[in-house]
Image (cartoon, helix red, strand yellow):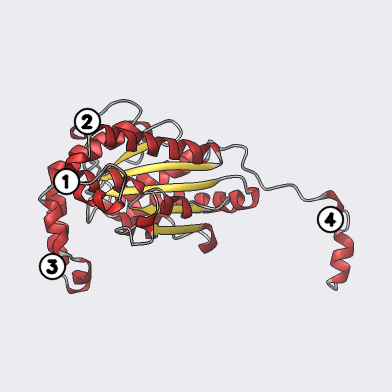
Amino acid sequence: MTAFNSQDFKITKPFKLSDFPTEIETSLKDKEKEKMLDEVQKPLSEWQDVMYAHNRYGVLICLQGMDTSGKDSLIREVFKEFNPRGVVVHSFKTPNSTELEHDYLWRHYLALPEKGKFAVFNRTHYENVLVTRVHPEYILNENLPGIEKVEDITHEFWENRFEQINNFEKHITQNGTIVLKFFFYMSKEEQRKRLLRRLEEEEHHWKFSPGDLKERERWDDYMKYYEEAINKTSKPNAPWYIIPSDDKEMARYMVGKIIWEEMQKYTDVNEPPLDEKVKVNFAEYKKQLGE
């Protein structure tokens, strides 16, 4: 396999995660997949330079997935050809005391990309309808009116939160932010292998956390809530893509290719024309520079 149809992985109607593979069958070697990604990186980085000059759009890339699904290494590989000024990565951890004094979307607004730049959210505002679904007691830290105990968190509460997220994404896309969202769908068995590798290989020890094992026990709950969240929030203005992630090299290529395909739809992105008053004085400028 040397190509794939990105539309097969774009969520445009109700779906079940179990209908998607966690790995795409291919006879390609890892080196071949890396070369395919290389062929996407260069034009994508060049497009970002033009977008920076155009100064009308920002791009928000949202990455979600279970621990060890490959988000960190994908960021490194997909965006390594970018001008450093053109991409900013935000990894959202547990909200701190300052962040908890605001609504849950506040810190994400602050991290939105400037015009002309890419922002990558490594874990995103969706943690607020994923981790908090598995651990609803975390909601109590937000000190919300009418929420005194877990039993106060109703089905309507979650429906409202999905609506709020959809409205947030609608607002930012209407104001020039291009939004693409990727769920890294890996198998539980592949996660087991990767966690073992962290324990067995000394250079990866620092990545291991006993908390990963506790969250792994809730695997089925996470898959249930991922499926629900994606179904409720994949919209034409901010689509979700399911990325089979047991094969890291293929996952990286898929994300890079999808981003590149989506960016090409913005045919209005061009370098701004040079001011004619400046252009007619080129000879004088060259003279001043000693040419």
Task: Identify which amino acid the numbered label 1 is placed on.
Answer: Ser
Residue type, mark 2 in image:
Lys
Q: Nearer the viewer, mark 2 or mark 1?
A: 2
Residue that label 4 marks: 278
Q: Which residue is mark 2?
A: 16
- Label 3 to label 4: alpha-carbon separation: 62 Å
Q: Nearer the viewer, residue 121 or 142?
A: 142
- Provide the secondary structure element on which disc 1 rests: loop
Q: Residue 197: where, in percent of width, then height?
A: 15, 64
Q: Which residue is mark 3?
A: 199
- Say if 9 sits above or below 85 in the image: above
- Whichever of callouts 1 and 4 sits on the residue coming sooner in the sequence is 1
- Circle 4: is it few (<14), some (14-19), or many (20+) Cα within 10 Å? few
Report whether 225 appears left or right of 284.
Answer: left
Spatial CA distance of label 2 from label 4 is 57 Å
Residue 187 badge: 1
Q: Earlier in the sequence, mark 3 or mark 4?
A: 3
User: In what element is the residue under mark 4?
Assistant: helix
N-term-proximal mark, 3 vs 1: 1
Task: Give the quadrant of the N terminus.
Answer: top left
Q: Is residue 89 left or right of residue 13?
A: right
Type of amino acid under label 3: Leu
Label whose residue precedes the other's in the sequence (2 or 1): 2
The CA distance from mark 2 to mark 1 is 15 Å
Distance from disc 1 to disc 4, alpha carbons, whole Å, reads 58 Å
Q: Give SS at disc 2.
A: loop
The front one of 260 and 211 is 211
Residue 61 vs residue 245: left or right? Answer: right
Q: Residue at x 53, y 58 (%)?
A: 86
Dot 1: within a 10 Å radius of its alpha carbon, few (fewer than 14), some, or many (20 or more) residues?
Answer: some
- The quadrant holding residue 18 is top left
> Does residue 46 sit above or below 164 in this rendering?
below
